[in-house]
Image: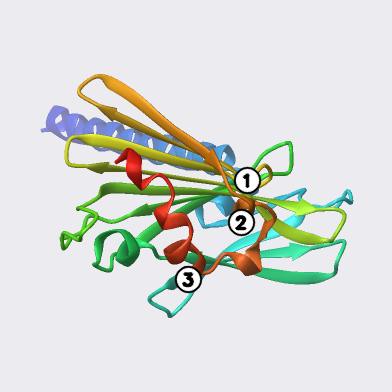
């Protein structure tokens, strides 16, 4: 009887020790995980970050703000320290323009060491309605911004659009500093290019980046390469 009681006591002591060890390991793991994430990483994941963008040495505050609008579902807000004001950049929903059907989009952005902010827009899977120009899948846009030190405005310096149309993979790239564009088409292992220049593609600023501008100008460049 005494032996049985002793064994039971030993089992309870061992279980108690194991539970304490598991809790200690779990707590240690949680603390380590929390320490691995910096404030900058957390802000970037939640759609915000601090980075140098204008011509002073103070970090700007970048934030993605959700917007209750079909065409402008999100806005990129930039607090310009040198100008002491916030600039809101509309992130346009171009799913209707390219597929005649509205789709939600996802936004990502970063600011590099050259003070260029790049916003990536990816569209959710959608049931498209074929248009005259044809159905486009895997639609992705990249827009590049920089602060113009001369006129103190935010300039759109580049735009890239990529998508799949039937068996063709199309990429359209625009350089709004030089006014040049290039369209690359890949199909069945072959690559072809079309390029050109237009004065209307120079000196584009965030206030110029509107749906009519994309619909009436940008949309038509390079369609011959499709």
Residue 64, position in %: x, y?
55, 63
Q: Which residue is mark 3?
A: 212
Furthest residue toward top: 189
Q: Is residue 158 left or right of residue 223?
A: right
Q: Which residue is mark 2?
A: 200
Nearer the observer, disc 2 or disc 3?
2
Q: Position of residue 175 (x, y in %)?
A: 60, 43
**Residue contact between numbered discs 2 and 3, judged by CB atoms under 8 Å:** no
- Say which of 7 and 16 sits in front: 16
| Residue at x-position 51% and y-position 66% | 213
Q: Residue at x 27, y 20 (%)?
A: 190
Q: Which residue is mark 1?
A: 179
Q: CA distance from mark 2 to mark 1?
A: 7 Å
The Cα atoms of the two marked residues, 2 and 3, are separated by 14 Å
Query: Left of 112 or right of it: where is 148?
Result: right
Task: Tell me how far mark 1 sits from mark 3, CA to CA.
Answer: 19 Å
How packed mark 3 is, by other alpha carbons closer than 10 Å (few <14, some 14-19, many 20 or more), is few
Q: Residue at x 16, y 59 (%)?
A: 130
Element type where label 3 sits in the image: helix
Residue 165, image x, y percentages: 22, 43
Would you place residue 197 above or below residue 124 in this image?
above
Residue 74 in sight in this render: no
- Label 1 element class: loop
The number of numbered discs placed on residues in the rendered structure image is 3
Q: Residue at x 33, y 55 (%)?
A: 123
- Mark positioned earlier in the residue sequence (2 or 1): 1
């Amino acid at each position: 009887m005494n032996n049985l009681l002793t064994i039971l006591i030993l089992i309870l002591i061992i279980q108690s020790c194991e539970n304490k060890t598991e809790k200690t390991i779990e707590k240690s793991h949680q603390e380590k995980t929390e320490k691995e994430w910096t404030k900058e990483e957390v802000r970037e994941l939640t759609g915000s970050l601090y980075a140098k963008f204008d011509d002073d040495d103070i970090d700007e505050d970048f934030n993605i703000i959700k917007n209750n609008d079909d065409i402008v579902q999100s806005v990129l807000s930039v607090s310009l320290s040198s100008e002491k004001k916030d600039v809101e950049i509309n992130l346009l929903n171009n799913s209707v323009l390219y597929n005649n059907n509205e789709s939600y989009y996802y936004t990502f952005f970063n600011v590099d060491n050259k003070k260029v902010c790049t916003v990536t827009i990816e569209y959710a899977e959608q049931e498209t309605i074929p248009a005259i120009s044809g159905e486009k899948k895997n639609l992705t846009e990249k827009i590049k911004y920089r602060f113009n030190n001369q006129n103190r405005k935010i300039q759109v310096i580049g735009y890239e659009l990529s998508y799949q149309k039937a068996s063709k993979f199309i990429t359209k790239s625009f350089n709004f500093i030089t006014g040049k564009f290039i369209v690359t088409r890949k199909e069945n292992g072959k690559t072809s290019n079309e390029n050109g220049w237009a004065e209307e593609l120079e000196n584009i600023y965030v206030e110029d980046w509107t749906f009519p501008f994309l619909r009436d100008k940008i949309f038509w460049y390079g369609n011959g390469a499709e």
